[in-house]
Image: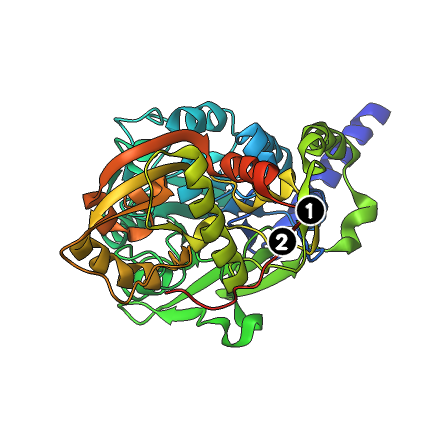
Amino acid sequence: MTMINFKYFMLRKFLLSVFVFMAMPAPAQHLVLLHTNDTHSQLDPASDGLGGVLRRKTLIDSIRFAEPNVILVDAGDVVQGSLYYSIYKGEAERKMLNALGYDIVILGNHEFDSGMDKLAQEWKQVDADLISSNYKLENTPLKGMFKPYALRKAGDKKVGFIGINLDPKGMISDNVSSGVEYLDGIKSANALAWYLKNVEGADLVVALTHVGYDEVAPPTPSDLLLAANSENIDIIVGGHSHTMVGPSMGSSGEWLVPNVVGDTVVIAQAGSLGKFMGKIDIDFDDKKIRTELLPIDARYDNRADLLLKEELDKYRNGIDSVVNVVLTTLDTDMPQGGVLMRNWVGDIVYALSKDVFESAVDFAVVNKGGLRNSLKKGPLTKGMIMTLMPFDNKLVVLEISGRDLKEAVPVMKDRYVNCVSKGFDFNNIDESKVYRFVTIDYLADGGDYMEPFTRAKVVESSPMRLDDAVVDYIRKHASDEISIFDNKSRL
């Protein structure tokens, strides 16, 4: 009898709990989308004290602890820009992606910098979903690694993700993007967004893009243009232009854009170097989307993941071996991309060409976009030069007609290809003459949209990286101090 009563009691308790559960309102359908872009190998805090992958992990972990549905995404250019990439070629960044638990990532243009073989080697080990919706990669080492879209669940809601990339022509060197076929970004985005909404039954479609907030990479459509010409995309999480986009950014840009049917597309982007992380709160019940940018700062230092710190320290040891090798001293600060820096780089490349090449040149030209850091007054180290010029660029001597050079000058001004040496008058080019100049292979191949340079003849080339050549030149020729005095624009 006792046993029967016990069973009856347990059955009654179970049924009562079921009835209570059924009577409760359904839980809110809520998703938190965390996003980064253009972190550019900045695994440590940047020079202004913001950022750092250890801090980012602490913040991500705290949000995951507090929220039931969290998806973490990256909009490209995880690599290139610090010694972590110069020395380890993406290995450190890949391990950090996995340690932070990224769910979905897309390619940026700098992912290609060390070539597709190296890219494939590293990204085959990335745990996240890899998506690219407008690159055909069948004829590359990346074949089979990327899907055109990804689907994720948030409660009982479906969220679809697509990845839209920039046109590699003019932005990524042909020799590292051979075989990549670009498909129109707007057409690809609209076709897949329609499919996700109408066939897969997605409740929300998010476009991860690496095209730029505005027209920074013509003819690739920008986030603004994509939003205005879309129909089924709800959110665009962007990259490439390093823009801070969101309601707290004031005049930094529009973040709510009407699409072709009058619905609102939310645009978000979190700047660069991992200084901020974007957070998008999506409430499927009240159909509200709220965005904010969270600063990654010293508040998180006392809660660092010690195992991740130990892993990162292994890579720091290799970096320390080159960071502190002093080459000379500077007598003034040189802000990143400022006139002083551009002229200094132009003059050094022109001067070192006399050591590297037999051909005499009329001038030197390098792109401002290849200079990725500031230089401070005082000791100038090898590590500082490697960080300033982190790309795998080689020096070449080109022979170009005056007509093509004259055509190139407006493009140089528009694209900030304006690190030029002194002594050459770009306003008085003789179209009937032939000029010789030293530059980097990226520009010679038409990078930064320097198509006129592709018509030039390669006279000489060097296997040395630009940063190595500059380090060698400073070692051989610099006195105890390098005087910086030319602060006038040369274009």
Q: Position of residue 232 (x, y in %)?
A: 32, 57
Q: Name the amino acid, label 1.
A: Asp
Q: Name the amino acid, label 2.
A: Leu
Q: Residue at x 32, y 59 (%)?
A: 412
Q: Position of residue 337 (x, y in %)?
A: 51, 59
Q: Secondary structure at mark 2?
A: loop
Whether residue 43 is situated above or below residue 371 in the rendered picture: above
**Extreme-left residue of the structure:** 432
Whether residue 151 is situated above or below residue 491 in the rendered picture: above
**Extreme-bottom residue of the structure:** 251
Q: Which mark is residue 375?
A: 2
Q: Earlier in the sequence, mark 1 or mark 2?
A: 2
Q: Residue at x 41, y 61 (%)?
A: 213
Q: Quadrant of residue 12?
A: top right
**Of 347 and 378, which appears nearest the observer?**
347
Q: Nearer the viewer, mark 1 or mark 2?
A: 1
At label 2, counting other C-alpha atoms closer than 10 Å, the crowd grade (few under 14, some 14-19, many 20 or more) is some
Q: Rounded to the nearest whole Å, what is the CA distance between mark 1 and mark 2?
A: 16 Å
Is residue 134 visible to the viewer in this orientation of the structure? no
Q: Residue at x 24, y 43 (%)?
A: 399
Residue contact between numbered discs 1 and 2, judged by CB atoms under 8 Å: no
Q: Position of residue 226 (x, y in %)?
A: 31, 60
**Of 374 and 47, which appears nearest the observer?**
374
Q: Which mark is residue 480?
A: 1
Looking at the rendered image, the quarter that the C terminus falls into is: bottom left
Q: Position of residue 118 (x, y in %)?
A: 44, 25
**Of 165 and 282, which appears nearest the observer?**
165
Q: Secondary structure at mark 1?
A: loop
Is residue 327 visible to the viewer in this orientation of the structure? yes
